[in-house]
């Protein structure tokens, strides 16, 4: 697996990032360890998690595995923002919550430092100065090496970057946005900001929760049992069949299967490789529940779609631009 720089930093990460959200939820600790070992064996070094995944259990599983590894050879990323208790200060991006969050993550991960510490989403009631100065202090303390953001809008990301530069604080090195063939709105503002400011980009849900995995084809009327879409609906994870069951989705999936057949790759490998081929992308985050899923996803690395194949996928997945983006694109 090839290595890429995280944006304009000197940090080298594998071109696929392993998402550990399934650990302790859909994957047992034994399967999680198998997934981690396989990922590292093929050259992966970049693992993303968050404090709230499985209410801390995901970090604990990763931490026990991490104790058996060469820590400095791995890039471990986690996040803070949502809490796991009922206390008033157990959520958000206040100095109190961020410091408690990083200390708890370090304890669960059984490590002295986090390579990439990300704010999981914007928090409207915390002054941005408080959040960014706290993150800067964590970098200066050595507990955090780099900082990043996830689920920010364009103006929020640019404001945070500008304020950090203005105050001489450590600035975000990375953005973790939703981005895939079915969700391309990230291209409107977020990706241009990242390219302009030199941020790495590690998209979450590059297979859109399984929609682009090859398990769904035109003509289906309900999600298949055992798929993430079905499970998410049953458990209230904020995903639904109706949100993507439309003509645009089926047109994208038609093109995906056609290109997969032409390239002799699986639909999931093609969808992941499309993300890898987009300008400014560092590493899409793959989230496997089983070894079979991981092995299929790993097949997205070390090759590239042809220009013609990229054109077919782009043409099928492009949506009409709203104002002002449509107007600006003509200038």
Image (spheres, grey):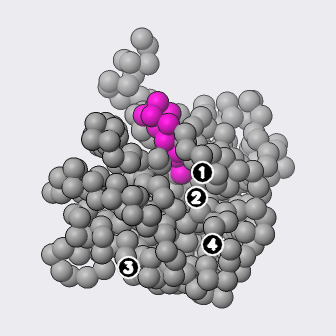
**Mark-to-mark CA distance, 1 and 2:** 17 Å
Select label 3 or label 4 by which is in front: 4
Residue 271, position in %: x, y?
Answer: 65, 49
**Mark-to-mark CA distance, 2 and 3:** 23 Å
Q: Is residue 26 positioned above or below 275 on the image?
A: below
The residue where tag 3 is placed is 104
* Disc nearer the start of the sequence (4/2): 4
Q: Indicate left or right for 231 with 286 as reference.
A: left
Residue 162 makes an appearance in the image? yes
The residue where tag 4 is placed is 71
Q: Look at the image and give the residue range highlighted in magenta.
A: 193-202
Label 4 crowd (10 A; few <14 / some 14-19 / many >=20)? few
* Disc nearer the start of the sequence (1/2): 1
Q: Quadrant of the C terminus?
A: top left
Residue 212 makes an appearance in the image? no
Residue 201 part of the magenta-drawn span: yes
Q: Indicate left or right for 260 with 91 as reference.
A: right
CB under 8 Å between callouts 3 and 4? no
The residue where tag 1 is placed is 11
> At x 32% / y 25%, what residue is drawn?
323
Residue 61, position in %: x, y?
Answer: 55, 84
Residue 64, position in %: x, y?
Answer: 58, 85
- What SS does tag 4 mark? helix
Q: Nearer the viewer, residue 142 or 307?
A: 142
The image quadrant that residue 137 belongs to is bottom left
Select label 4 or label 2 by which is in front: 4
- What SS does tag 2 mark? strand
Q: Indicate left or right for 88 with 142 as reference.
A: left
């Amino acid at each position: 697996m090839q290595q890429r720089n995280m944006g304009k930093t000197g940090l080298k990460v594998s071109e696929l990032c392993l998402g550990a959200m399934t650990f302790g939820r859909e994957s047992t600790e034994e399967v999680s360890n198998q997934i981690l070992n396989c990922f590292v064996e093929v050259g992966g070094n970049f693992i993303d998690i968050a404090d709230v995944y499985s209410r801390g259990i995901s970090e604990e599983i990763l931490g026990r595995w991490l104790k058996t590894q060469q820590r400095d050879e791995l890039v471990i990323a986690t996040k803070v923002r949502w809490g796991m208790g009922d206390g008033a200060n157990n959520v958000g991006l206040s100095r109190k919550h961020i410091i408690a969050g990083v200390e708890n993550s370090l304890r669960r991960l059984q490590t002295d430092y986090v390579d990439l510490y990300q704010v999981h989403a914007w928090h409207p009631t915390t002054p941005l100065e408080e959040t960014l100065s706290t993150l800067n202090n964590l970098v200066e303390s050595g507990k955090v090496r780099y900082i990043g953001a996830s689920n920010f809008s364009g103006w929020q990301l640019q404001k945070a970057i500008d304020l950090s530069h203005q105050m001489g604080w450590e600035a975000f090195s990375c953005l973790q946005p939703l981005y895939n063939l079915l969700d391309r709105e990230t291209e409107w503002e977020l990706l241009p900001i990242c390219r302009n400011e030199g941020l790495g980009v590690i998209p979450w849900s590059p297979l859109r929760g399984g929609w682009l995995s090859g398990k769904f084809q035109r003509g289906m009327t309900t999600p298949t049992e055992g798929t993430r879409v079905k499970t998410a609906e049953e458990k209230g994870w904020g995903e639904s069949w109706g949100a993507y069951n439309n003509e645009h989705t089926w047109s994208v999936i038609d093109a995906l299967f056609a290109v997969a057949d032409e390239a002799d790759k699986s639909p999931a490998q093609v969808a992941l490789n499309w993300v890898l081929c987009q300008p400014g992308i560092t590493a899409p985050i793959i989230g496997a529940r089983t070894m079979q899923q991981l092995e299929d996803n790993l097949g997205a690395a070390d090759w590239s779609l042809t220009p013609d194949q990229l054109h077919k996928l782009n043409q099928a997945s492009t949506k009409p631009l709203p104002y002002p983006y449509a107007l600006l694109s003509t200038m």
